[in-house]
Image (tube, rainbow, N blue to C red):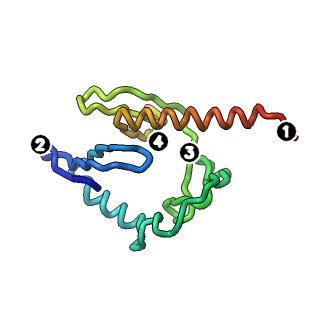
């Protein structure tokens, strides 16, 4: 983490950091949510060293399998709430992307927009471009794989 400060109005903690794959990030957390955030991060870490200290990440993506509760898919080898070795992926019914009009200069990405399981993410413009590029490259690779003749 590079720095963490309180916003001028005292309602948010602002964290400025740089991610290996995202570049510069500004994360904002409501001040009344910070204790919950710290507890969640501590719980996710489980008192052990970060995953990066456990060796390199696998080069191939894990297989994706249907989730038994029908909520989406599960990728073995990633982190999740019930099992530290899995993460649940949900296939959204819809999504919307728009510029944040509050003056923060963020791109908003909302999954399941206006539905019960709505979830939102905010990206800096550079991070949004990297996300868009990554999505495009991955989609192109899958489409090329599907179009390739099977031998």
Q: Position of residue 60 (x, y in %)?
A: 64, 53
Q: To which residue does mark 2 refer? A: 8
Residue 69 can be seen in this image: no
Callout 3: helix, strand or loop? loop
Between marks 4 and 3 in the image, the one whose residue lies nearer the viewer? 3
Query: How many angstroms separate mark 2 from mark 1 (CA)?
Result: 60 Å
Between marks 4 and 2 in the image, the one whose residue lies nearer the viewer? 2
Above or below 1: residue 142 = above
Quadrant position of the N terminus in the picture: bottom left
Q: Position of residue 140 (x, y in %)?
A: 64, 32
Above or below 23: residue 125 = above
Above or below 68: residue 45 = below
Query: How many angstroms separate mark 3 from mark 1 (CA)?
Result: 29 Å
Which mark sits nearer the N-terminus, 4 or 2? 2
- The residue closer to the viewer here, 20 or 81, is 20
Q: Residue at x 37, y 37 (%)?
A: 123
Instruction: Give the tally of numbered discs.
Output: 4
Callout 2: helix, strand or loop? loop
Quadrant position of the C terminus in the picture: top right
Q: To which residue does mark 4 refer? A: 117
* Quadrant housing residue 68: bottom right
Q: Residue at x 62, y 34 (%)?
A: 139
Query: How many angstroms separate mark 4 from mark 3 (CA)?
Result: 10 Å
Query: How many angstroms separate mark 3 from mark 2 (CA)?
Result: 37 Å
The mark found on residue 90 in the picture is: 3
Q: To which residue does mark 1 refer? A: 150
Q: Residue at x 59, y 61 (%)?
A: 77
């Amino acid at each position: 983490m590079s720095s963490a400060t309180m916003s001028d109005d005292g309602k948010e903690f602002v964290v400025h950091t740089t991610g290996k794959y995202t570049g510069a990030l500004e994360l904002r957390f409501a001040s009344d949510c910070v204790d919950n955030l710290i507890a969640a991060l501590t719980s996710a870490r489980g008192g052990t060293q970060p995953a990066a200290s456990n060796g390199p990440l696998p080069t191939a993506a894990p297989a994706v399998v249907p989730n038994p509760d029908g909520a989406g898919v599960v990728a073995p080898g990633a982190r999740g709430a019930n099992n530290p070795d899995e993460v649940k992926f949900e296939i959204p019914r819809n999504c919307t992307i728009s510029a944040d009009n509050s003056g923060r200069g963020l791109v908003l990405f909302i999954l399941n927009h206006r539905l019960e399981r709505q979830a939102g993410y905010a990206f800096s413009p550079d991070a949004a471009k990297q996300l868009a590029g990554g999505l495009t490259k991955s989609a192109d690779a899958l489409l090329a794989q599907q179009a390739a003749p099977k031998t």
